[in-house]
Image (cartoon, helix red, strand yellow):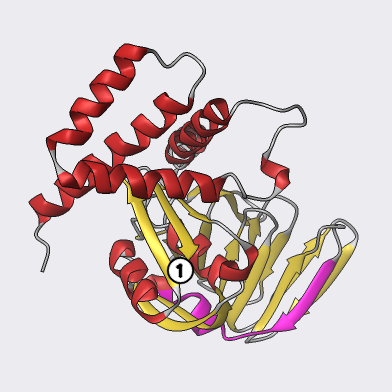
Amino acid sequence: MTNVSDKAREDAVAEEAAGWVARLSSRDATAEDRRHFEEWKAHSPAHAAAFAEMSGLWGDLAQVPKSVAPRRRRSVGSGIAALLLMGCLGAIANEVGLVDRYRADFYTPVGVVRRVDLDDGSVVTLNTDSAIQVKYGVAERRIVLLRGEAFFDVAPNAAKPFVVSGDETQAIALGTHYAVKIGKRDEVMVQEGHVAVTAGQQRTVLDAGGMAELDDNGMLLTHTGDVASLTSWRSGKLVFSGRRLGDVVAELGRYRNGRILVLDDKVSALRVSAVFDSGNVDQALDALQQNLPIQVTRLGGWLTIVRGR
């Protein structure tokens, strides 16, 4: 079994190798750069092996869908440099919620789930990297979800409706337990009771097991699902049943800093049924690698690549 110090050394060598690939592929690489590289590579067989691995990996990355490529042609070196920068920016992106946190009454950092007891007896459980404002007034109890996802156990009060505002929706509790999630689009999931969901002039009432979300055209769609599994993060578990690997990886990525990148659509379309510990994403990735035809490559703590093998 690999111990922590061995893994740290492997990560450091992989990061150095990635840096050498980027440097040697750039237009301004010098003879001195190449000399230092040869010295580094000769220092250990592990260095040479890591460089070969990273060279092949960046070659695969060059085949990532054209949507990530610029319109004009660039050098291989600048493309790799952009990918390295993208990895760093991906790590920073997890912390972009600093503005939301400043505005929030309650928030959670990446990887943390927190219970918040409100003054009226309601309970909010905040998922990873989430933030809310509490705006209790005379006529209503309003929660503004600024970021992420939250589960609400609502204390009944007919005189003061409990309303959760997302980016484009409002979810009004009619005595219930439900979750609201914002991101690419708003989602509402009801575990118990009833929730009235509005989006502009659109309105629907969800019962237990009901879910609502906005599509790309702003239409409010409803369906049913396993809400208990989808909100299992409250107990530290992530439950997936027949989910696409791309979706699973995206969900796992919410619970750790850095970026996880799936290289191609074929790998992304693989189906996954599993239960993972939300507090150990690396363990989940290792399990996926053991059970699927994929290879997981970590570049330090800021970028993880998932590709077919």
Q: Residue at x 45, y 76 (%)?
A: 293
The secondary element bearing badge 1 is classed as loop
Specify whether 5 is left or right of 202. Answer: left
The image quarter containing residue 198 is: bottom right
Amino acid found under the numbered disc labelled 1: Arg
Decide which of 155, 309 is in the foreground and name it: 309
Quadrant where the C terminus is found in the figure: bottom left
Q: Tell me the residue that label 1 is attached to.
A: 309
Q: Residue at x 33, y 63 (%)?
A: 281
Residue 186: image x %, image y %? 69, 59
Q: Is residue 208 above or below residue 71?
A: below
Specify whether 115 is left or right of 174. Answer: left
On whether residue 225 falls in the magenta region, the answer is yes
Residue 112: image x %, image y %? 33, 56
How packed mark 1 is, by other alpha carbons closer than 10 Å (few <14, some 14-19, many 20 or more), is: few
Q: Residue at x 53, y 71 (%)?
A: 245
Q: Residue at x 28, y 34 (%)?
A: 16
Q: Is residue 133 visible?
A: no
Q: Tell me the magenta residue range.
A: 220-232
Decide which of 140, 169 is in the foreground and name it: 169
